[in-house]
Each structure stands twice: as structure tokens, then as C-alpha cells.
Amino acid sequence: RVSYNKAVDSHMLFLDAESVDLSHNQEQLERIRTGYGALFVCSQESKKAIALYRLRPTAFLSRPFSAAVLDQAMSRCVSVWQNGLQNLELTENRSRLKIPMCDILWAEALGRSCMLHCLCRDMQIGESMNELAAQLPGTVFIRCQRSYLVNLHQVNIHKKQ
């Protein structure tokens, strides 16, 4: 069982040591490890966990583990996660800000400036809609109308029943 956070460029891997066949997958495990910024090995058997030590894990989690133990292990890789975020540098009231692109919900034009609606708050920025659109990745943000720009990852679809 493998899971990772694909919302950021730096991935985290949670590897269940009991589900890994060490005799056949050594090269595959090495290839997997190179693609992740943080590796957490979860195991009930210490021998299996020790066998995976060559992958240089961020932490070993002995099952069952508490939320506090997981929190402590995750705090070791916060910098990996933060470095993987794509930020947008903007001007608000003559101050430069770095906003994670994943926090932007949508933007609307206000003459020569824009109102940026984010998860934490709304802010009026000094960039025009054209300038803002040029800074955002076109695969994630779409200009659905001349005055509006929408983050497609933040759109929820509800079907009528």
C-alpha cells in the first residue's frame, strides 16, 4: 500500500513494510525512493523495517502508532513540503507577498487591479487581470470570462438527483 501527496512537487511516501517483497523488488524500491522527498516506513515487524533502512527513510512508524507519533515524524519533512509549493509573488498595498498557488480560489478584475479570493482571505492586488493570468499556470487556472480567473482544482461539481 503506497500513498503520496501529489498536490506538491515534493512527494511523501508511506510504505507498509509487510506488503513489500524484498527478494524481488530491491531495484524497484530504489527507483521509488528517488522520486520522494520523504519516506515513512510503517511496520509491526522490526526485521522488515530494518531491511528497508537502506532506502534512508525519514522515519520508522511502528504500528499501531498514535497521532502524536505521526505528527512528530511529519514535522521532520515540513521543509520538503514547503519547498515543493509553487508561490505567486504579488503586491498588496505596496507590500510584496508570497501566496501558495494552491490557496487561490479565483480572481476578479477591478479596473486596473484585481481582487484575489484565497482560502485565508480576500485581497486587492496591484496586478491587472492580464498580468495575473500570465503568472499562473494555464493548466490549473482558466480565464472563464474576461473579468474572472478560476482555479480548476478548487471547483466542486454537484450532480442534481
Image (cartoon, rainbow, N blue to C red):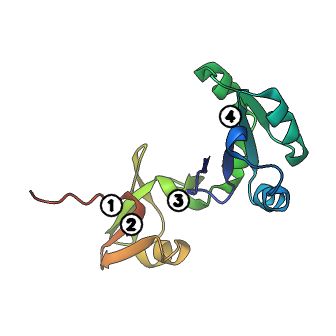
Q: Give the residue pinned by disc 3.
A: 101
Gap between marks 2 and 1 measured at Cα: 5 Å
Which amino acid type is marked by label 2?
A: Leu
In this rendering, position of residue 99 left or right of residue 129:
right
Which amino acid type is marked by label 1?
A: Val
Q: Give the residue pinned by disc 2.
A: 152
Residue 74's tag is 4
| Label 1 close to label 4 by CB (< 8 Å) | no
Residue in view at x 68 percent, y 55 percent: 84
**Residue 145: horizontal and vertical position, in percent?**
28, 78
Tag 2 secondary structure: helix
Residue in view at x 90 percent, y 45 percent: 54
Q: Give the residue pinned by disc 1.
A: 155
Q: Give the mark toward the camera: 1 or 3.
A: 1
| Label 2 close to label 1 by CB (< 8 Å) | yes
Q: Answer yes or no: is residue 42 visible.
A: yes
| Label 2 close to label 4 by CB (< 8 Å) | no
Q: Around disc 1, counting alpha carbons within 10 Å, would you say few (fewer than 14), some (14 to 19), or many (20 or more)?
A: few
